[in-house]
Structure formats: structure tokens, C-alpha cells
């Protein structure tokens, strides 16, 4: 099991008991716009996903880790590497803290910092990128805090509540780790 420890949180591999947590996140319509989800997921499908979560990042092309605060294991968020491309040494990054009460508590900052370090030191990635809606000021601030730079804007990229919205792509080149 992958466990990355920080000062106040740790990141761990997904476990079977994360079923209800992931079910709640994947079926929360208010966050579908950031997760590119359009339909609900069944517990059956999520159980199948968790059964395959042991796959290596080189096989699955993604790595999803639970963000936890307490030693009793409950997840409060997820952080992902997706579109893992070992030929070009890059991956996308996504992060979600489930409850509003846990946001703006530096949890996302600590999780992102650990994932950046892991990606550059252990996976030897050359770059990370994030797709962020132009209206998502907290995410833009989080990623720029760690040196991600906006390298472009995709016009009318996402249809959200009947309105097309722009999405920016942020990139971090491995020069510091």
C-alpha cells in the first residue's frame, strides 16, 4: 500500500472500505463539473473499480490516492494522477476535498505538495498539468502556489448549467525537485 505522510495528513492507496466515500463523491452533482462526470455511478461499478485499484500506474495510467487526517483511516478527499504518459514523463493532476468544512485548511496544499514530490522524485516525471475552470479561483490559487503556470485557455471548453465556460491548462515543469 502506498502511504505518503505529511505534517497533518497522509495519502494512501484506496481500500475496499472507501466504497461509500467514493460513491458519495461520484454521485454528487455539484462536483460533476470538475470531475467530468455526466452520470451517476452504481456501488457495483465503484466496487469493481476498487477491486482493480491495485494496478500499477504503468498499467492503469492513473493513480488515485485517498487524503486522510486521522489514523483510523477515513478519507476526506482524493488526489489523482491521470493520463499518465511514461514515454513523455507527464501526468495530469486532480484534487478534491469532499466537505466544505475541510477546505481552506491547508489540506489541499499539503496533499498537492506531497504528490508533486512523489511524481518528480519517484516517478521521475518531467511535468505535471492541471485543467482548471476559469471561475475556480481556489484551484488556480492552489496550483500557482506550487509554481504551476497558466499556459493556455481552452475557449468554451465545458458546458456547465447550459453555459459554455473556458478552461485553463496549468503546467509545472520539474526544475526544482
Image (cartoon, rainbow, N blue to C red):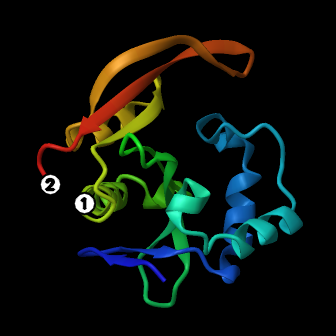
C-alpha span from label 1 to label 2: 7 Å
Q: Residues within 10 Å of mark 2 (few under 14, many from 20)?
A: few
Residue at 83% across / 54% down in the picture? 41
- Mark 2 = which residue? 177
**In the image, is 42 to the left or to the right of 175?**
right
Instruction: Give percent across and percent down for residue 2.
Output: 44, 78
* Mark before the other along the chain sequence, 1 or 2: 1
Q: Is residue 83 above or below residue 75?
A: above
- Mark 1 = which residue? 117
**In the image, is 135 to the left or to the right of 151?**
right
Residue at 43% across / 89% down in the picture? 71
Classify residue 171 by image quadrant. Answer: top left
Q: Is residue 141 above or below residue 49?
A: above
Q: Residues within 10 Å of mark 1 (few under 14, many from 20)?
A: some
| Residue at the farthest top position | 155
Instruction: Give percent across and percent down for residue 74.
Output: 55, 79
Amino acid at each position: 500500500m502506498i502511504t505518503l505522510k505529511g505534517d497533518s495528513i497522509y495519502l494512501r492507496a484506496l481500500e475496499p472500505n472507501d466504497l461509500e466515500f467514493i460513491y458519495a463523491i461520484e454521485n454528487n452533482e455539484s462536483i460533476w463539473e470538475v470531475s467530468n462526470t455526466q452520470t451517476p455511478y452504481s456501488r457495483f461499478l465503484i466496487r469493481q473499480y476498487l477491486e482493480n485499484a491495485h494496478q500499477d500506474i504503468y498499467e492503469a495510467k492513473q493513480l488515485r490516492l485517498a487524503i486522510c487526517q486521522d489514523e483510523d483511516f477515513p478519507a476526506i478527499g482524493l488526489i489523482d494522477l491521470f493520463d499518465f504518459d511514461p514515454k513523455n514523463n507527464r501526468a495530469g493532476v486532480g484534487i478534491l476535498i469532499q466537505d466544505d468544512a475541510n477546505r481552506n485548511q491547508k489540506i489541499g496544499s499539503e496533499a498537492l505538495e506531497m504528490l508533486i514530490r512523489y511524481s518528480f522524485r519517484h516517478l521521475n516525471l518531467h511535468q505535471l498539468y492541471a485543467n482548471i475552470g476559469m471561475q475556480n479561483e481556489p484551484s488556480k490559487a492552489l496550483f500557482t502556489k506550487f509554481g504551476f503556470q497558466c499556459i493556455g485557455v481552452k475557449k468554451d471548453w465545458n458546458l456547465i448549467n447550459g453555459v459554455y465556460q473556458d478552461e485553463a491548462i496549468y503546467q509545472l515543469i520539474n526544475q526544482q525537485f
